[in-house]
């Protein structure tokens, strides 16, 4: 959509962008500390459009928020950090973002926004970048929000599909033998990834042996889950998700509400269920045997959740 410039004429949209949400199937938190995580990109995400303007600004809907570099506010600082990676000899841009994900839910909303802004700017400036490189670039955005992000959220926001991510290593794409029907339910409790990640780091500092063993256990589950996805063994994948939930609870990351959602999903036919993302609130994911069962699981979760969604990960 063209937007009017100061002279009242319509200016052409220079670039369009997209960043997708993600779910971590297994491996959150351990991935911050060098272990692998298995993650999947979602169809839902953030759409952006960049239009040449008098000065740089970012406007995000449905939040009705506009920020400019130089303002002392996380979104403005993240925008400024991203803009610093672009040539200084460039036109200014107004970036409009339509955010189609809940924030603070474990679905990678902030990373999707950062990737979508970078995508629109890249297109506007005719900068050729691979999705992986865009994921890498948007880490500077994500650091403003999350302090010590592993990088999994921004990489999945940029690349999508199903993949194993390990800090500092190239993304390892996974080809699921069959698509994974997932049900996502929001507990209605919001949580700060930055604070929850810092809490886990404090646990590791106090009890390195216990917490290190939990991380190693999670890494073993991730490696087995990758094989289960490749072999199309949904039953095994579900069991591994349940075990991961147990280890996340041992790190005090679950809540009563998340436990209720996991139990409800399993009783309604899910093969496995766990929190996804930072925990301490946010979303639960459940693996359904098929899409029809996913509908029934979603119906059972609805009375307990502030938002539900069925997604098929790994569908071509
Ligand atoms: C957040 O989606 C996942 C965490 O592992 C944090 C991170 O990887 O940066 C909790």
Image (cartoon, rainbow, N blue to C red):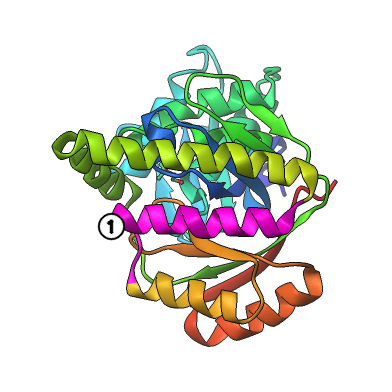
Residue pictured at 75% horizontal, 76% vertical = 293
Residue pictured at 45% horizontal, 42% vertical = 218
Q: Residue 149's quadrant in the figure?
A: top left
Is residue 14 found left or right of 96 in the rendered image?
right
Seen as rendered, the residue at the extreme bottom is 303
Residue range in magenta is 233-255
| Residue at mark 1 | 252
| Residue 134 seen from this side | yes
Q: State the image coordinates of residue 56 (x, y, percent, origin top left).
A: 47, 33
Find out whether residue 35 is within the magenta segment: no
Is residue 129 found left or right of 167 in the rendered image?
right
Closest to the observer, 61 or 230: 230
Is residue 9 found left or right of 198 in the rendered image?
right
Q: State the image coordinates of residue 155 (x, y, percent, origin top left).
A: 57, 32
Q: Residue 297's quadrant in the figure?
A: bottom right
Q: State the image coordinates of residue 137 (x, y, percent, origin top left).
A: 52, 23
Seen as rendered, the residue at the extreme left is 206
Q: Is residue 249 above or below residue 143?
A: below
Closest to the observer, 135 or 200: 200
Q: Is residue 9 above or below residue 299?
A: above
Q: Residue 121's quadrant in the figure?
A: top right
Where in the image, quadrant-wise, is ligand 1 located?
top left
Kindly report the secondary structure that dominates the magenta region of the rendered protein: helix
| Residue 4 seen from this side | no
Q: Is residue 315 above or below residue 6?
A: below
Find out whether residue 235 is within the magenta segment: yes
Is residue 113 found left or right of 290 in the rendered image?
left
Secondary structure beneath label 1: loop
Residue pictured at 57% horizontal, 53% vertical = 240
Q: State the image coordinates of residue 253 (x, y, percent, origin top left).
A: 33, 57
Residue pictured at 62% horizontal, 51% vertical = 45
């Amino acid at each position: 959509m063209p937007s009017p410039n100061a002279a009242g004429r319509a200016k052409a949209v220079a670039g369009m962008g997209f960043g997708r949400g993600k779910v971590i199937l297994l491996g959150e938190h351990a991935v911050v500390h060098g272990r692998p995580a298995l993650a999947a990109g979602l169809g839902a995400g953030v759409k952006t459009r960049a239009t040449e303007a008098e000065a740089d600004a970012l406007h995000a809907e449905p939040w009705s928020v506009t920020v400019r570099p130089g303002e002392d506010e996380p979104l403005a600082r993240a925008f400024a950090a991203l803009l610093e990676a672009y040539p200084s000899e460039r036109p200014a841009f107004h970036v409009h973002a339509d955010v189609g994900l809940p924030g603070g839910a474990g679905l990678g909303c902030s990373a999707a926004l950062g990737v979508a802004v970078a995508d629109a700017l890249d297109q506007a400036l005719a900068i050729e970048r691979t999705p992986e490189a865009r994921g890498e670039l948007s880490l500077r955005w994500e650091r403003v929000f999350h302090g010590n992000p592993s990088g999994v959220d921004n990489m999945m926001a940029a690349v999508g599909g199903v993949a194993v991510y390990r800090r500092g290593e190239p993304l390892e794409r996974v080809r699921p033998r069959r698509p994974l029907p997932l049900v996502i339910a929001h507990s209605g409790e919001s949580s700060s990834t930055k604070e929850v990640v810092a809490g886990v780091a404090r646990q590791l500092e106090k009890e390195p042996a216990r917490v290190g063993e939990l991380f190693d256990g999670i890494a073993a589950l991730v490696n087995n889950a990758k094989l289960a996805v490749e072999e199309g063994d949904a039953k095994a994948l579900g069991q591994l998700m349940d075990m991961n939930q147990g280890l996340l609870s041992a790190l005090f990351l679950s809540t009563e509400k998340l436990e209720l959602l996991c139990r409800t999903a399993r009783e309604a036919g899910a093969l496995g269920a766990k929190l996804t993302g930072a925990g301490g609130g946010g979303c639960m994911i459940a693996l359904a045997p098929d899409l029809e069962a996913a509908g029934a699981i979603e119906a059972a979760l609805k009375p307990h959740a502030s938002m539900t969604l069925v997604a098929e990960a790994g569908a071509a």
